[in-house]
Image (cartoon, rainbow, N blue to C red):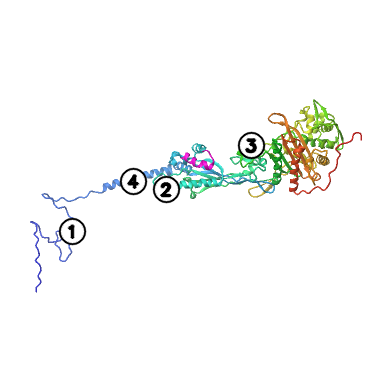
Amino acid sequence: MPSQEPPRRRVPRPSGARRPTGRGDGRPQRSGARPAARRPGPAAPRPGGPARPLRLGNPRPRLRLVSLGLTLVMLAFVVRLLQVQAVDASAYAAKAEKNRYLSHKLAAERGEITDRSGVPLATSVDAYDITADPKMFTPQESKVPDAPEQAAALLAPILGKDPAELVRTLKSPPSPRYAVLARKQTPQVWNQIKDLRTLFAKKAREDKARGGPGVSVLAGVLSERSSKRVYPNGTLGAGILGYVNADGRGGGGLESMLDEELAGRDGKITYAHSGGRRVPTAGARETPAVPGSDIELTIDRDIQWAAQKAISEQVAASRADRGYVVVQNTRTGEVLAMANAPGFDPNDLSQADSTAMGNAALQDAYEPGSTAKVMSMAAVLEEGAATPGTHVVVPNRLHRGDRLFKDDIDHPTWYLTLNGVLAKSSNIGTILATGQLGPDQAAANRVLHSYLRKFGMGSPTGLGYPGETSGILAAPKDWNTSQQYTIPFGQGLSLNAMQAASVYSTIANGGVRVDPTLVRGIRGPDGRFTPAPAPGTTRVVSEKTAKTLAAMLESVVDDQEGTGTKAAIPGYRVAGKTGTANRVDPQLGRYKGYTASFAGFAPADAPQITVYCAIQNPTQGSYFGGQICGPVHKKVMEFALKTLHVAPTGKQPPRMPVTFTPGA
């Protein structure tokens, strides 16, 4: 059956429309070709008028305008760049350098002070100076109007400072970029501040992430490594060592005397910082610090401890103003101990009594009393005016000049040898003996004065200690009527404890005075030890005179007639002398109270150690030197002999007569 197609529907064309016969561009369409995509043509003609073609605007004017704008912007950048890098380069570089870099010193490590065995008496430990960059606390930098107040409130409890003081430091610093908030703080204190800074820095970052200012009021708190002076033995030897002040410099004692050697040389570091932190990649300029030298003293720590304990106990028991003990090597002049009571703790100066912060054994000048009689006897023996057996008749009273002189006790007429005058410490007998030094009293005064000077009276000891007194010894032409007769028995002149000890060391050393020394040597930063220069020596009396005097001084301790029996040490021969002098009260300017003393050396037949003790103004119990200083001398001497392994004496002391029988 033939297929049938549905008839095609014819769509009527509008009137006037043409059947498309080609490609739409007026050209006939080729057979088999695909019809071309329709291109947009001109808009259809509006009804009632001819068609108008669409025309695009010319882009060139707009491009020229944009190019001109960009050129002007680039030109401005170029001009500014030239200004910064060429015209004002140095000014801007200096400003950037100033704002970016911080400089501070690198504190040199202070040298140690040790005893003769190398045991530290003063040393230094790590510490920190807490500093600040005040600019970072200004409102412009901190973005907080009260940054100093906030920081001070946080830091004051840690540093133990008044918040108002910290605020003043931050607002009115000595330098616009540097201020010290606290010095010599322990590592624990700095660790607390660091932890607090870290906490506030974290909060600042979180605040910034939320769109806030993101600032920390502690960002400008910094630190500098430093060191803190510590004294491991507390009060032990404080009078010798002194202390270091808040600036790290020696403020007294050997710390001040040897400050240049101990302090070393500070260094300096300059580094870049940002936001209170050091920029590690920016580099730094550093001049290293040179550490100080170590000082080795002649002091023996153990003997110093024994001396300080003994004098402290006796001063407390006697309710005295103060007391001192000096221990010296008789042959070398080395000071083995120099103890003062009361003392102070250089670790905590806030609790120290200002009157006890010096070294009274070197800085107190006082009249020695009868311990000075050994110098008078040395002059009498050396000049040949008398011998130990010379008879001296001692009345109960002696009229000389405008005064009536007496001994410390009333007594009938004594018939004493010269040795007995020293053993019984007779003032009258000493006046009579020294009167034989010249044809008249004026000549005798000049001779005695020359010996006193050779023993070191009126001169520095040679230690060079800060604040040391030379004592007082007037020229013989200036001695008044009273002094002519009091100076021979130790009133009318003054000395310090070290000078007094040196007198007895001179006798013990065969009549040769050796300048006392406190420093054995210095060990530099390179570890090299340099011994101290040898001390100076002076021949004062002959060896014969010195030996005779040593034997006479044994009578003071060994003979029952002597005044120093409480200083005797079983197994050792001890030579010594008591002293009880009227004391000049420094506040009243007149005599009030007493100075009790005892000086001696041992073993008397081969002397090695001198011990001198003095107690000022004892007000409870006895005030006689033999009674309160004799026991102190015994304790310290016995300890020193055992510490230095000095063998006991093997020989018995000579028995020199103390009295004589009239007419015999």
Closer mark to the observer between disc 3 and disc 1? 3
Q: Which mark is residue 206?
A: 2
- Does label 2 or label 3 sit earlier along the sequence? 2
Q: Is residue 272 left or right of residue 448?
A: left
Q: Which residue is mark 3?
A: 353
Figure quadrant of the N terminus: bottom left
Residue 371 position in % (x across, y down): 77, 36
Examine the structure image and report whether residue 158 is included in the region drawn in magenta: yes
Disc 4 versus disc 1: distance between alpha carbons? Answer: 44 Å
Q: Which residues are magenta?
A: 147-162
Which label lies toward us, 2 or 1?
Answer: 2
Evaluate whether residue 524 shows in this view: yes
Image point 10% across, 68% down: which residue? 5
Whether 601 is among the magenta residues is no
Gap in angstroms between the C-alphas marked 2 and 3: 52 Å
**According to the image, label 1 marks what residue?**
38
- Report whether residue 532 is seen: no
Badge 1, how many Cα within 10 Å: few under 14, some, many 20+?
few
Q: Residue furthest bottom?
A: 1
Instruction: Quickly name the residue at label 4.
Output: 71
Q: CA distance from mark 2 to mark 1?
A: 63 Å
Mark 2 residue type: Glu
Query: In 3D space, how far apart are the residues under numbered discs 3 and 1 (Cα atoms)?
Result: 113 Å
Q: Position of residue 400 (x, y in %)?
A: 82, 27
View extreme (top): residue = 402
Instruction: Name the side, left or right, on which 308 lies relative to 413.
Output: left
> In the structure shown, which secondary structural element does the residue marked by tag 3 occupy?
loop
- Secondary structure state at the residue bearing disc 4: helix
Q: Amino acid at mark 4?
A: Thr
